[in-house]
């Protein structure tokens, strides 16, 4: 390690303050990735500090995205939070709509703490979906026991509000499906959080919308958890479609801790849905 760190030191001394000029070419990106992997904390910080201002740009380019992944991987948690707050969330709408951006967001979701995941989920719900969780909770909460006269007066306004929220949610969900954004872990994590606040009708709708995409939800914690919830509330037809979607991937899912959770859910579920 000491010899490698000495080599990294020589490379960084030669590059000096021109690190950004090496990012976008294949060889230059590979050299900087190696410096991050084999360097000490001070050397990694040197690369981090120079590239942080262009971190978002690194994610969008074909060679430099791998450098961005390495920067994030070898950063301290406090530096990761800075990158997420200052570089990721400020450009979230662009990232989630690009192939490289989606790949990077998936990497963050799998490699980060719950705190960072919560930051991204909160941003998705409040800034991208633009519907605060408290509004969704209030909209779908079960009606409390009231006398008939109170219920009649309340229902006219509440029904309108409920349909407005429901329509906004369904439009958003279907648009994400159309653009394949539903495959991103942050979408799945956000929908997983929202799912607990939906009423039965909305839960069944979500289950039916994604029953043909079950295999896309089983490679991260949040997606697998959401799949278990959808399987629980779904109709027999929906559950059979979900099972059919994973029949050819059983061996692969057994070796995947997230997919295995869903397989166990299916096996333990007592109805006529058959796995094999």
Image (tube, rainbow, N blue to C red):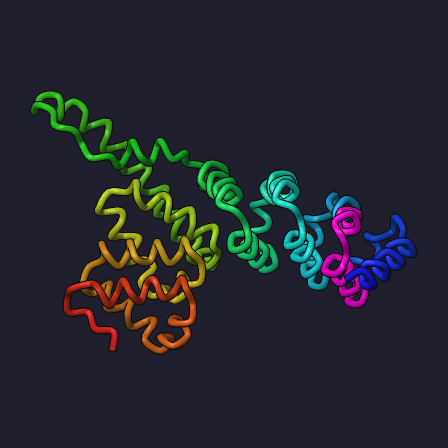
Q: Give residue 102's quadrant in the image.
A: bottom right
Number of marks in picture: 0
User: In which quadrant is the N terminus drawn?
Assistant: bottom right
Give, as a single range, the part of the protein colored magenta: 24-47
Residue 145, given in percent of the width and then of the height, sits at 12, 27
Residue 275 against residue 166 in the figure, above or below: below
Is residue 170 visible from the viewing direction of this image?
yes
User: In which quadrant is the C terminus drawn?
Assistant: bottom left
Is residue 128 visible from the viewing direction of this image?
no
- Residue 226 left/right relative to 125: left
Residue 163 or residue 115, whichever sits in front: 115
Residue 110 against residue 158 in the figure, above or below: below
Residue occupying image coordinates x 72% and y 60%: 37
Residue 121 or residue 76, whichever sits in front: 76
Q: Is residue 25 magenta?
A: yes
Residue 78 against residue 260 in the figure, above or below: above
Q: Give residue 21's quadrant in the image.
A: bottom right
């Amino acid at each position: 390690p000491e010899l490698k760190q000495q080599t990294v030191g020589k490379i960084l001394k030669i590059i000096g303050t021109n690190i950004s000029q090496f990012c976008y070419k294949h060889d230059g990106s590979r050299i900087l990735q190696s410096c991050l992997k084999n360097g000490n904390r001070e050397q990694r910080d040197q690369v981090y500090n120079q590239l942080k201002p262009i971190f978002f740009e690194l994610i969008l380019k074909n060679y430099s995205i791998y450098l961005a992944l390495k920067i994030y991987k070898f950063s301290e948690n406090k530096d990761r939070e800075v990158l997420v707050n200052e570089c990721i969330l400020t450009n979230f709408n662009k990232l989630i709509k690009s192939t490289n951006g989606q790949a990077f967001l998936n990497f963050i979701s799998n490699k980060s703490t719950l705190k960072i995941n919560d930051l991204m989920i909160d941003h998705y719900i409040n800034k991208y979906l633009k519907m605060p969780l408290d509004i969704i909770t209030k909209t779908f909460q079960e009606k409390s026991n009231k006398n008939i006269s109170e219920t009649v007066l309340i229902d006219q306004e509440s029904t309108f509000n409920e349909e407005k929220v429901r329509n906004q949610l369904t439009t958003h969900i279907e648009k994400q499906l159309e653009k394949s954004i539903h495959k991103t872990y942050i979408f799945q994590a956000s929908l997983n959080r929202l799912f607990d606040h939906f009423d039965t009708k909305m839960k069944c709708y979500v289950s039916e919308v994604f029953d043909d995409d079950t295999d896309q939800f089983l490679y991260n914690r949040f997606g697998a958890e959401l799949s278990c919830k959808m399987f629980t509330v779904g109709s027999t037809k929906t559950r059979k479609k979900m099972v059919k979607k994973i029949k050819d991937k059983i061996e692969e899912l057994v070796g995947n801790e997230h997919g295995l959770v869903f397989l166990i859910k299916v096996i333990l579920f007592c109805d006529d849905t058959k796995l094999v």
